[in-house]
Image: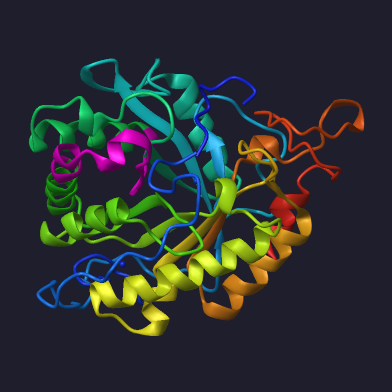
Amino acid sequence: MWSYRKPATVGLGCLIAMVTTACSDQGEAARPAPSPPPASSPPASSPPASSPPAEAGTAYAPYVSATEAAGTESAGSPTTYNLAFVLADGDDCTPRWDGARAIGDPAVKARTARLEKNGGRVRVSFGGASGKELAAACDSAAELAAAYGKALDAAGATRADFDVEGDELADSASVALRSKAIALLQKERTDLEVSFTLPVMPSGLGKDSLALLGSANDNGVQVATVNLMTMNYGTSYDGDMGGYALTAAKAAHTQLKKVFGTSDAAAWRGMALTSMIGVNDVDGETFTLADAAEVRAFAEEKGVGWVSMWSAARDRQCANGSTSDQPATDCSGVRQSPGAFGEAFAG
């Protein structure tokens, strides 16, 4: 998923407590679905008593900038805003918004307060496509957990999203450290709701994503949602972004059931779908308003936990009503009214 720093640019096992977004794991072409894990994988367990309450139906939770407000971010009346992104300050284990702004910046705190005043909760998203994720900068699980905690406290949030992609998705050391740190954090904060945002192909989650979920499971992490980045398909793309999102969701659903030994309904409820609206950052991929309506209808039919988009700031037509084959950070590149994608995803 894009970073705001770029130019123009579930228990499932121990994992999901759920009764209640160019990714290196994808590659240039469709890959066959990875083999299921061995039978010794941990069995599914019941969600803990401290699990957060369910939201009725399929929620809408767009990604928004932690530092810059957009006039379209309230379209569709989101129940949750994914605040992107918290990164490391270079090689230092210090959390910063976009890796640059102080985590205690009063302007960001005021922004989160305004979002919540508008009726939505805030989920802090760690990672993204650019910059250095804290798990690659911190030396110990305790230090990493403390860094995550500082960001959550700064936003007044009890929800954390971990967007893991690029080189760090294949970095087994940072994957293991992250799992241990999240487990520590959940022991300290029993109301902490966790999601993982991972790349997906029409064939499902790749081996690195499955290994990450396995690591979280092995460390006893409770994860509310596995959020699929339904975008960036490369040369495998056949022209139907909405159809690809549905195919990817079905393939991942089968994988999640096998990995965590959970029911059909629980696997759907522990899933989220995030699309990059309009012109994507892979040539030839354009996600339309019709695609958004298709994804929303599918999510409601299956009981998917929430749907999202990258990003609310892009949910408007570009200047002078122009369309473009190049992605931009502040408009979709397709003809639309302001907030139209938000309304479509909200249903």
> How many numbered discs, if any?
0
Q: Picture coordinates of residue 42 (x, y %)?
A: 13, 72
Residue 255 sits in quarter: bottom left
Q: Residue at x 19, y 42 (%)?
A: 178
Name the side, left or right, on which 224 lies relative to 2: left
Residue 136 sits in quarter: top left
Name the side, left or right, on which 334 lies relative to 178: right
Query: Is residue 171 within the magenta segment?
Result: yes
Q: Nearer the viewer, residue 44 or 194?
A: 44
Q: Is residue 100 above or below residue 52?
A: above
Q: Picture coordinates of residue 315 (x, y %)?
A: 72, 41
Q: Nearer the viewer, residue 68 or 134?
A: 134
Q: Is residue 72 above or below residue 239?
A: above
Query: Is residue 137 within the magenta segment?
Result: no
**Which stretch is magenta?**
155-177
Q: Residue at x 73, y 56 (%)?
A: 343
Q: Can residue 113 be seen from the camera position used here?
A: yes
Q: Residue at x 50, y 45 (%)?
A: 28
Q: Quadrant of the C terminus?
A: bottom right
